[in-house]
Amino acid sequence: QVQLVESGGGLVQAGDSLKLSCAVSGDSVSAYVMGWFRQAPGKEREFVAGISTGPGELYADAVKGRFTISRDNAKNTVYLQMNALKFEDTAAYYCAADRDSRLATMILLNYDYWGQGTQVTVSS
């Protein structure tokens, strides 16, 4: 059973940086497409960033150039480095794993395993 545990969320000011971590257990993170999604109150869950099993990353337009997703296979962990945070980045952030794909996608239904989420709050 694959389990994902996010950490690193918190309260920051606009313009600050924050790094989220997603620790994976039960299988090797290198075998999965990994993604980060977020959900603000009253809104649908949306794609933020994804990383393929090989080279290749995918970003939502809203975070492109500010956020970076990375993977550390030795630590079985995926990260989301968030720079130049904006008020509109405020949301619960979720890590997800896709067991069947090789290339990252924005499609929420492709992801099979989900973490419990970590809250990011950006004050303006």
Image: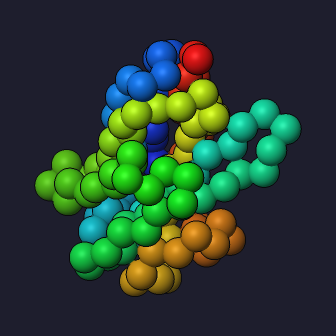
Residue projecting furthest to the right: 42
Relative to 62, does residue 86 appear above or below in the rendering? above
Residue 37: x %, y % from top left: 57, 52
Splitting the image into 4 quarters, where does residue 6 fall? Answer: top left
Count every numbered label the image shows and give the total. Answer: 0
User: Residue at point 47% right, 17% down?
Assistant: 12
Residue 109 appears left or right of 22: right
Residue 103: x %, y % from top left: 42, 81
Instruction: Using the rendered image of the protein, determine whether residue 23 is visible from the camera's viewpoint.
Output: no
User: Residue at point 55% right, 22% down?
Assistant: 122
User: Residue at point 49% right, 51% down?
Assistant: 63
User: Residue at point 44% right, 56% down?
Assistant: 64
Instruction: Using the rendered image of the protein, determine whether residue 51 is visible from the camera's viewpoint.
Output: yes
Residue projecting furthest to the left: 74
Residue 82: x %, y % from top left: 39, 39
**Quarter of the figure with the C terminus:** top right
Q: Work out whether residue 83 or residue 96 is closer to the camera in this orientation and state it.
A: 83
Q: Work out whether residue 86 or residue 19 is closer to the camera in this orientation and state it.
A: 86
Splitting the image into 4 quarters, where does residue 104 fall? Answer: bottom left
Residue 42: x %, y % from top left: 85, 38
Relative to 123, does residue 40 appear above or below in the rendering? below
Image color mode: rainbow
